[in-house]
Image (cartoon, grey):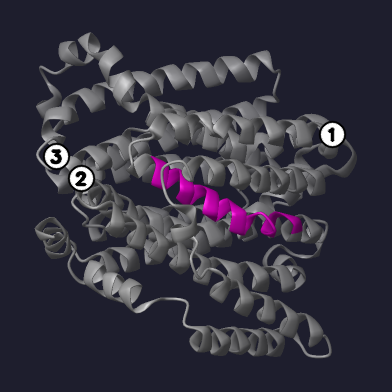
Amino acid sequence: MHLAPYKNFTFVLIGRLYDYIITLALLSGLARLAGSEVMGIYYFARSVATLTATFSELGLSRYTIKSLAEKPRLYFILFGRLVVLRILLSVLALLILFTALQIAKIDDEIVQASMVFASALVLFQIADLYLDVLRARETMLMPVLLSILQRTAYVGFAILGLILGYRLAWVLTAFFVTNLLHLVLSATLIGVKFGQARGQFKAALGELSSLFKDVGTFTSIVLLGAISGRIGVFFLYYFHNDTSVGYYGAAMHIVEALFYVAYAVTSVAFPNLVRLYANSEANFIIGARTVTKVLLTFIAPLACLFFIIADPLIMRIYGSEFSAAILTLQIAICATVPGFLNAFLLILLQAIGKQRLAAILMLPFIVIQVVAAFYLIPSHGAHGAASAFAIAEVCHFVILTFAVSRFVKIRELSRDLWKILVPVAVLVSVSSMATALDEIPRLIYGTLSFLILLLFLKPFTDGEMQWLRTSLADTPRHNRSIQAQ
């Protein structure tokens, strides 16, 4: 059943924020009950496992959603072949991971943690294959509820084990078991039986090349993005130690909160933008500009507030042992605004069918980050890793802006963005000057000044507000009105 985009956005945002908060509770428990070294092992294993699971995912989720947005009846034709492909790639990915860890002579404890984490993530992704049919139909409630259920069970059992003294092994076991149950429950509730894939095995093997061709560009984008997010972790592990990885992981998880808001907006906007571009370029520009303003309105002030209160955030969540992560957090926050703009520009390229270009443009981002990390991390540790990430995001934004300008009118896309950036600058000024006050009054005064100036400047035009109301209220009817024009 189709749900209005504002409901889907609300569901996705609630789900992502809940996931963030409860995972933060787990990391806080790890930091306080197990220490920074165990925290570093956990974050390294998580990073390696996420990269492995990204390879096995093959970009199938984005490909499925885009295909369904264009051809709603396509899912059950593809389902059997996608399941077979997912399983084959998962086995291959786990074998590659184990071999790579052995060649790199990683400690046995980290190898075991990485393998369990990766196996659990593969189970979660297979469950996601079932739930993609609902996401493509713009029905986000069921996937969000199932994710909340899995996360609650996982973190609950994990923290219980930490309190009882079982440490990391218990945490990883809880993650694997709850993901297995999540897969069984997803398959049961969606009503798609694996038996529907029977008879598709030979077809899947016979058409692997065509499937790779269809999803290859989506895979490249997702995989390269996953690699870029873990470069700092890998360099820190080899040039420093598990403790430095723990500091970096503690800071980066707080930064992830800002990207969750962007994820909630873009995941709802993507299928809508695909349809808009297919019907009307003018409406596509209006929709893309409106989404850009919505994202900037949320992310920019939050990034500034997080920067200002970085000290109490780290100290109250992780404890005094992680005080070295404060500056790391502030540096990483500087990358959030260009980072979320980059994510949205990549979404735009995919929405207009330029997936291959989007994948190619991920390469300079990774190269810049690797070079910066090589020079900065050995001497600056976690601070250097965050700096390399920030430098790469800024350079990537310049490259993507130039690339998108070839297909989309950047002036039209960026119109009136200054009406959001000026209130953000005022927020920073007010919060920075009120140093005699505690954090909470400073945040209140800064936020109020931002909201008042935002209301005065009115960054959203009447046409954008009308598009936003109509689009959020009823997407199908809005699309029919576009076609009629």
**Amino acid under label 2?**
Ala
Amino acid found under the numbered disc labelled 1: Tyr
CA–CA distance in space, label 2 to label 1: 44 Å
Give the numbered dot on residue 69. Answer: 2
Give the extent of the magenta segment: 331-349
Label 2 crowding class (10 Å Cα cut-off): few <14, some 14-19, many 20+?
many
Q: Is residue 344 magenta?
A: yes
Q: Secondary structure at mark 3?
A: loop
The reply to whether the C-beta atoms of the residues labelled 2 and 3 are less than 8 Å apart is: no
Mark 3 vs 1, N-terminal side: 3
Label 2: state its secondary structure.
Answer: helix
444 shown above or below 125: below
Residue at left offset 44%, top offset 64%: 18
Measured as percent of width and height from the top left, residue 325 is found at 77, 56
Q: Which mark is residue 266?
A: none
Marker disc for residue 71: 3
Q: Please identify the residue farthest to the right as the structure is shown.
A: 379
**Quadrant of the frame with the C terminus:** bottom left
Q: Nearer the viewer, residue 66 or 227?
A: 66
In three-dimensional space, the C-alpha distance between marks 2 and 3, rounded to whole angstroms, equals 6 Å
Marks 3 and 1, how far apart at CA: 48 Å
Task: From the viewer's side, name the closer residue of 180 and 193.
Answer: 193
Disc 1, SS = helix
Q: Is residue 131 left or right of residue 311?
A: left
Position of residue 385 measured from the top left corner of the image (x, y, whole percent): 75, 43
Q: Residue at x 52, y 17 (%)?
A: 96
Residue at label 1? Answer: 375
Please state which of residues 13 and 271 is positioned toward the viewer in this rendering: 271
Q: Name the spot of residue 139 as percent of width and height, x first.
A: 21, 57
Which of the 4 quarters of the picture holds residue 215?
Answer: top left
